[in-house]
Amino acid sequence: MLSNEHINLIKTYRKKRPKYIKFPKIFKEEHTIIHLPFTEINIQPDENVKKELNENGYEIIDYLKGTAKKITDEKNVYKIGKVLNKLHNTELIKKFEQRTKGTLTKDQHSKLLIVFTYNDQDIAGMSTNKHWTSCYNLDNGCNKETALNSIKYGNMAAYLIKEEDYNDLDKSLARISIKRFVHYKDNKKYILLAENKIFGDEELSKIINFQNIVDNILNEYNLTVKVRGKKKFKRLDSKEFGYSDSYSENYEYLTIKEELKLIINGSYKVLKNGSINVDGDVNLKLEYEHNNPLIKDGKLTVKFNKVSRNFTISYCGLTSLDGCPNEVGGTFNCDWNNLKTLEGCPSKVNGDFCAYNNIKKFTKTEVNKFCKIKGCILN
């Protein structure tokens, strides 16, 4: 609970809130509860465990189930724990056990909630009296003024919590801060963007796709905001040097057409079937961005047909290669994603094929099964 001193301070900032600040109808109450849809649990292998297995001739099949196979033997299945025991690597055994110990059954998963809140105390206290802390802590945080200004400027927060604890957000498992951006010509028009940083149980948040669920719900609202001219917005709390982990002062909500112009170095043509031919390079990397209309639910939202030079789609959180071009004239790069299969990849690549640092380590045999390559396979 917040102290009386905190509460009085919060009331002072609440009185400063401009009258034009409203909240979307999708959040009917100060605490809007979203029941999580159960999704397939997807745990990234520990890089050190993965490296140790690879160096000893093993490849991970399913990290959650703890299974692996020998690279030279496609038939037999081995237990990762037993392999690590044989290698006498006690440190990696601990890492492997910790990584899988916290996974959820479907029943446990269904008892988790996301609470979207614009309650003043929930916003100002988002890093006070929680099992995490940050620069927003009201007692000693270097950016506690930002937490207080979040009330004044209509920011929100999303909390991940167990069903039985939803009335006590101090027991939350994780939290994401949500920033308000107002249109540069009309401050009554606004969008809400989630910070690309999670406080609390980051591992659990990855398993249940906490960030993606919050982003998708906010995007449903953001796409309904109609403005004249460009969808150009400014972060409201930046008026008083409000701190953000993810955003600068301005944000432009681009259309798919506008995004294509940014990632294509060359010219492109949309064919009658809706697919895209590119004369030049395509370079899409979302390492520090998570609200791009070209990616949704781990897939491309557009379909490429032919790309004359290089095609790069890295750090995009992809779980599928659907939408990738059929032919690539240069190098095809899909590294640093969450891929378990190469289905949907190009059938022809005239340069190199790069697919390293995905959930699955793809063998050269697997790559050649899907694609005819003239260059090297970097896996």
Image: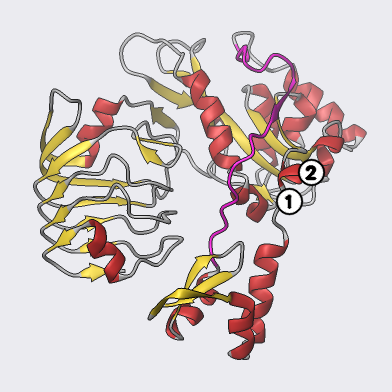
Residue that protrudes farthest toward the right in the picture = 4
Distance (Cα) linking label 2 and label 1:
7 Å
Residue 301 visible in rendering: yes
Task: State which quadrant residue 152 falls in.
Answer: top right
Is the residue 250 above or below the residue 96 in the image?
A: above
Is the residue 151 above or below the residue 341 in the image?
A: above
Give me the residue at 56% from left, 70% from top: 67
Give me the residue at 66% from left, 32% from top: 157
Numbered disc 1: secondary structure: loop
Whole-percent x and y of residue 240? 57, 31
Say the numbered circle drawn on residue 128.
Answer: 2
Characterize the magenta stretch by its predominant secondary structure. Answer: loop
Q: Is 233 in front, or is 353?
A: 353
Numbered disc 2: secondary structure: loop
Whole-percent x and y of residue 241? 55, 35
Q: Is residue 142 magenta?
A: no
Whole-percent x and y of residue 80? 59, 76
Residue that protrudes farthest toward the front in the picture = 75
Q: What range of the chain is rendered magenta?
A: 21-45
Q: Amino acid at mark 1?
A: Thr
Q: Which residue is mark 1?
A: 133
Of marks 2 and 1, which one's residue comes earlier in the chain?
2
Q: Amino acid at mark 2?
A: Thr
In this picture the colour scheme is: secondary structure
Tally the marks.
Answer: 2
Q: Quadrant of the C terminus?
A: bottom left
Mark 2 and 1 residues: CB-CB less than 8 Å, in contact? Answer: yes
Say the numbered circle drawn on residue 101.
Answer: none
| Image side of residue 83 versus residue 136, left or right | left
